[in-house]
Structures are given as C-alpha cells and as structure tokens.
Image: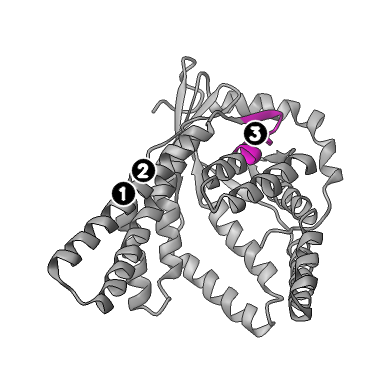
Amino acid sequence: DPPSGGNPAGETCRFTFTGGGGAYFRIWIVNLFLSLLTLGIYSAWAKVRRETFFHGNLMLDDSSFGYHGKPIAILKGRILAVVLLIALSAAQSAGPIAYAIAMLALLPVVPWLVVRAFRFRAHNTSYRGLRFSFHGNYRQALTTFVGYGLLSAVSFGILFPLFYHRQKKFVLDNLRYGSSQFQCATTAGQFFRVFLQPVGLAVGVLFGVGILTAIGGLAPAVLPVIFGAGAVALMLFLMPYIRVRTTNLIWNRVTLERISFSSSMEVFPYFRLIAGNLALMVLTLGLFWPWAQVRLARYRANCMALQLPGSLVGFIAGETANAPAVGDEISELMDMDIAL
C-alpha cells in the first residue's frame, strides 16, 4: 500500500491489532480479582482498562484508536441496570400479572437506554484525536428495538433477519466521525439469504441423520441423543458462519463519505479459531480466555481495510478543521453509560 498522503489517486489502509495475550491476561486477572473483592463495584474500572487495551492496540495507518470512558459514568449505568433487574425480579415474585405489567412499563424505557449506550460509546471513542458521535434518536430506537423486536418475537423468529438488519442500519446510519456520516447500504433481503442458507443446511443434515438412524434400526431412546449431538455440532458451526457472513455483508457495504470499507473474513479459518479457543479454554479451565479474545481481535482486524480516493491524512485534517462546528452537541450527553 502507498504511504499516508503519498498517492493522490487513492489509498488503501489496513487495520491491525498489536496487543498480546500475556499483556491482556495481566489486566484481566487483576480486573477479575478486584471485581470479586468489591462485589462488582470495580467492574466499571475494569471495563475502562479492558476497553483502553483493545482500543489502544487497534491500529489503522500506524495510529491507534482511543477510549475515553470514565468509570463513574459506567458505574452509574450499572447501578441503574441493577435497580431495573431488582424491580423486574420483585414483579416476577409478585405474580405473572405484576411481571407482565412491569415488562410493559419497561418497553418504552429500552429505546432510551439503547440511545444512551450508543452515544456514550461513540463519544468516548476517538481516532487521531477526533471523536466519533452517535445521532440516533428515541423514535428510531423505539421502532427498531421494540417494533421490529416484537415482530421477530410474534413470528417465532422468522423475521429475526429483518430485526437484525434494522439494528445494524440504526447504529451505522447514525454514526459519525467528525462531521462525516457512515452509511450502510445493506438490504433486509441480503440478511434473509445469509440466515436461510445455514437453516436449510441444518434441516437437511438433521433429516439425513434421521434417515440413517432409521435405516440402522437404532433404539428410539438413542434418537434424542443423536439429534441433540447433531444440533449442538450444527450450532457450533452455524454461529461462526452467520457471524462471518453478516460481518462481511455489512462492512463491504459501509461508506464514510468517499471512504469505503472491506471485510474479508472466511468461514473455515474463523471456525478453526473459535474451535481452538474453546478447546484451549476447556483445557485451561477458562484461563485461556484473554488469549482467546486477543486472537479474535487480531483476526478481525487483519480482515478489515478501508479505501479512499485521496489520503487518510488529508481526510482527517479536513474533519479536524470542521470539528468545532459539530462539537457543541457533546454537552447534551448525559454522563452515564448504560451498556454493560
């Protein structure tokens, strides 16, 4: 790739992740110990340390991303989340009617929580000194997470790809870097195709297993075990498949002004990575978790790139010059992180 600013005809910049598993293990083990010691209170500070590590080691054109979240703001959000959970638990103990009323009362609150979470995360993420921002509003979140969420539920999951598509559109179409806005040009039909292919494969495999077991004359008591094992094996493969296909689908159709993104994740390498991580976590009784997270972050970063007609340095310089014009909205953000 040409060096930054060296090719006026265009530039391709790749993402990389430079963090190591050993470095993250030291952060993770201290976070775990102090969170347990303080009955979860330290988890807000733990999140800041974790996000700072992963943002700071995500590189684009030899510059890292930054994370600026404050532990107290995260702690406020977690206290609110705990209060809501306690209220729901109390309503459930009071009976099904009280629980249903509490759930209905919580529905209008969900979009507000979602908007707060996305605004906090975007505002506290930066690249080369320039922060991101999120401009989604309550009405959009209500339509996306409550409206399409209920459609997915009443259709018994048939419309889940539509719900998932609307979530991604809501987040990306309302995200900005400086004064430039992201746009995601995906369609619901593309998401349906991604989900229908593995579902068809799963039905075909289970049907084939059923025929083979019937021909083999196996005892009826064995059939649930075989189908259960087959279902688990399919899920272990299908979840990475859907993750890879949807990630590529989204990022290969995302633009930021004249910048286009690309994702080149592949199903089988990603599946081997996930399977290897699971096996090593079992063998180490969970201690491999930090290395597993670093391996995933490195693979995802290595598969991501962006292309722009000029130079990245020139683009950021223009955005930095426009930053004062869009910076006043930051004062409207409430100092609280809802995301857990």
Few, some or many residues within 10 Å of mark 3 (<14, 14–19, 20+): some
Q: Amino acid at mark 1?
A: Leu
Q: Is residue 324 left or right of residue 229?
A: right
Say which quarter of the image contains residue 226. bottom left
Q: Which mark is residue 312?
A: none
Gap in angstroms between the C-alphas marked 3 and 1: 32 Å
Outermost residue on the top side: it is 9
Please tell me which residue lies in front, 1 or 296: 296
Q: Is residue 128 visible?
A: no
Q: Is residue 288 left or right of residue 220?
A: right
Look at the image and tell me in which quarter the C terminus lies: bottom right
Front of the two marks 2 and 3:
2
Q: Which residue is mark 1?
A: 201
Mark 2, secondary structure of its residue: helix
Say which quarter of the image contains residue 338. bottom right
Q: Which residues are magenta?
A: 169-182
Q: Is residue 87 visible?
A: yes
Q: Position of residue 39 (x, y in %)?
A: 68, 82
Say which quarter of the image contains residue 132. top right
| Mark 2 touches mark 3? (CB < 8 Å) | no
Q: Position of residue 284 (x, y in %)?
A: 36, 78
Q: Amino acid at mark 3?
A: Asp
Residue at the spot x=40%, y=58% of the render?
295
| Mark 3 touches mark 1? (CB < 8 Å) | no
